[in-house]
Image: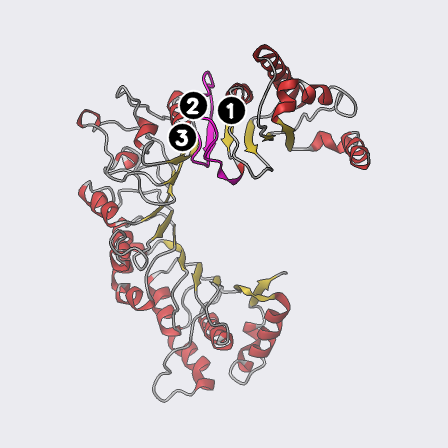
């Protein structure tokens, strides 16, 4: 009774007209029996409308046995869908969550496909995301769902239905985030079983999850197919899923964001097809590379091979490079080659530790660098004849000014947090020669602790003469 009163108070409050998202939770059996519709047709739900809702999340708690007659189920399903449409007439995005709270195996009923199909027909953006990744859900068919602009499919369930749905909506799709597998690989996004290839003229974002066979290629007769001519963002969370350059064809002038792990086979394929050549991708602004050579040396490219690949891209657009898999020594060894990357603005080296002199060399090579992410740095070896307290004067007289665009250094969580004082001194030394540097972030230390550390460092004999400059440097720790 108390919960029902709270519902009445909320639904009767005028602020529900401002809601942008709506979540509906119903039992599958109640939907088909008509109980859910009766509940939504009486107070406090009967007159409730959400005219500003854009996105609906629909959680369906799966039942064991649905005993209602098919004709009754069909009628109740259609009526419920129409009630939802009436309540949220402007909804454009629908997220469907099949769910169960019971520790037993469940499978969607024969009627669930009709429910999903009718719900998805209401909107242009759909997402299927079963809780707990149910792999035993019945395969959906989703016939007659057209004019979609966004599909998100984040589970191994009904892969074939969603690749088919993508092909059927290829002329209107703008964003596709899809789970693929060895048996329903990435090739099925493009090619039907009869060999017909789909073209996605409006697709700008393609995200691939799962583990597909990276030796799949289109048949010889399809080598000139350009399926994604206007692609801007390509993400592959596990590995590039094809054995040829199909996903890169015809979009070199539009591609802005690239994220994928680098396997040896992928590097070999990209070189074979000359996918990346100097100035081939003028708009490429963010390159996120992951390399797990230390974990799977037989499959993944070495750190050096990965970095050489990135250096070979050679884009002139302002660029973000994240998750570069290199050590400090490897990076410094390649600094002479960094002239190809003078446009880099953001550089993420999450797993390496730089010393002060390596950081200075890096900033010299990357004049546009504004944001840097590394493990906490160290000062390193002192120059001959220079004492520690004299180091600020030496650094300023030798290197200032430099790194005029550099403003933020994020410190990722180290294994050993006891050397943070040395790391902070290193960053402050660099701040003395970078006139616009103002912020350090370190989420592994508390907010109060960060303030105390900065005050201590600036008041030390080493930095006291430069307090007027360093007092503007902010060290941000976590807020919890």
Q: Let me know if residue 89 appears in the view.
A: no
How far across and how far down the image is residue 56, in percent?
A: 60, 30
How far across and how far down the image is residue 55, in percent?
A: 59, 31
Nearer the observer, 402 or 117 = 117
Q: Let me know if residue 76 appears in the view.
A: yes
Nearer the observer, 83 or 141 = 141
Q: Which mark is residue 124?
A: 1
Q: Which mark is residue 115?
A: none
Q: Are marks 3 and 1 in contact (CB under 8 Å)?
A: no
Nearer the observer, 27 or 249 = 27
Instruction: List the residue tagged with mark 2.
Output: 172
Q: Is 84 on the left-hand or right-hand side of 150?
A: right
* Magenta segment includes 155: yes
Quarter in which the N terminus is drawn: top right
First in residue order: circle 3 vs circle 2: 3
First in residue order: circle 2 vs circle 1: 1
Which residue corresponds to the image point at 50% horizontal and 21% vertical from the top-left? Answer: 113
Q: Is residue 88 above or below residue 395?
A: above
Circle nearer the viewer, 3 or 1: 3
Q: CA distance from mark 3 to mark 1?
A: 19 Å
Q: Which residues are magenta?
A: 132-159
Specify few, some or many for label 1: CA neighbours under 10 Å numbering under 14, 14-19, or 20 or more.
some
Instruction: List the residue tagged with mark 3.
Output: 159
How far across and how far down the image is residue 310, in percent?
A: 29, 52
How far across and how far down the image is residue 126, in percent?
A: 51, 28
Specify few, some or many for label 2: CA neighbours under 10 Å numbering under 14, 14-19, or 20 or more.
some
* Magenta segment includes 131: no
Specify few, some or many for label 3: CA neighbours under 10 Å numbering under 14, 14-19, or 20 or more.
many
Does dot 3 land on a helix, a strand or a loop? Answer: helix
Magenta stretch prevailing secondary structure: loop
Q: CA distance from mark 2 to mark 1?
A: 9 Å
Q: Are marks 2 and 1 in contact (CB under 8 Å)?
A: yes
């Amino acid at each position: 009774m108390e919960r029902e009163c709270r519902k009445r108070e909320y639904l009767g409050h005028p602020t529900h007209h401002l809601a942008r998202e709506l979540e509906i939770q119903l039992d599958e059996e109640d939907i088909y029996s008509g109980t859910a519709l009766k509940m939504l047709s009486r107070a406090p739900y009967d007159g409730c409308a959400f005219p500003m809702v854009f996105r609906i999340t629909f959680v369906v708690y799966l039942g064991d046995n649905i005993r209602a007659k098919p004709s009754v189920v069909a009628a109740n399903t259609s009526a419920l869908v129409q009630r939802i449409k009436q309540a949220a007439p402007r909804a454009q995005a629908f997220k469907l969550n099949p769910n169960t709270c019971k520790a037993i195996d469940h499978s969607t009923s024969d009627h669930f496909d009709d429910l999903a199909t009718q719900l998805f027909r209401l909107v242009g953006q759909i997402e299927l995301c079963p809780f707990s990744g149910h792999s035993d859900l019945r395969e959906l068919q989703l016939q007659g769902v057209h004019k979609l602009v966004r599909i998100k499919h984040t589970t191994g369930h009904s892969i074939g239905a969603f690749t088919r749905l993508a092909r059927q909506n290829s002329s209107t799709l703008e964003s596709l985030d899809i789970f693929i597998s060895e048996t329903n690989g990435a090739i099925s996004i493009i090619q039907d079983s009869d060999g017909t290839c789909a073209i996605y003229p409006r697709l700008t974002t393609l995200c691939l999850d799962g583990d597909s066979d990276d030796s799949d290629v289109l048949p010889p007769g399809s080598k000139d197919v350009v399926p994604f001519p206007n692609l801007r963002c390509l993400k592959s969370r596990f590995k590039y899923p094809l054995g040829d350059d199909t996903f890169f064809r015809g979009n070199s002038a539009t591609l802005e964001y690239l994220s994928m792990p680098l396997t040896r086979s992928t590097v070999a394929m990209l070189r074979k097809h000359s996918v990346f050549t100097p100035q081939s991708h003028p708009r490429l602004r963010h390159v996120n590379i992951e390399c797990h050579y230390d974990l799977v040396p037989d499959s993944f490219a070495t750190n050096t091979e990965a970095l050489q690949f990135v250096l070979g891209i050679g884009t002139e657009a302002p660029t973000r490079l994240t998750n570069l898999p290199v050590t400090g020594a490897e990076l410094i060894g390649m600094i002479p080659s960094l002239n190809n990357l003078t446009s880099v603005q953001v550089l993420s080296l999450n797993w390496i530790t730089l010393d002060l002199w390596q950081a200075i060399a890096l900033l010299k090579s990357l004049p546009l660098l504004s944001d840097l992410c590394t493990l906490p740095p160290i000062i390193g070896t002192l120059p001959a004849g220079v004492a520690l307290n004299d180091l600020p004067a030496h650094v300023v007289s030798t290197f200032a000014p430099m790194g005029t665009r550099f403003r933020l250094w994020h410190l990722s969580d180290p294994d050993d947090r006891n050397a943070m004082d040395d790391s902070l001194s290193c960053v402050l030394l660099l701040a003395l020669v970078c006139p616009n540097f103002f912020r350090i972030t370190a989420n592994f230390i508390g907010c109060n602790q960060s303030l105390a550390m900065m005050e201590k460092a600036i008041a030390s004999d080493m930095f006291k003469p430069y307090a007027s400059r360093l007092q503007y440097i902010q060290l941000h720790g976590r807020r919890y």
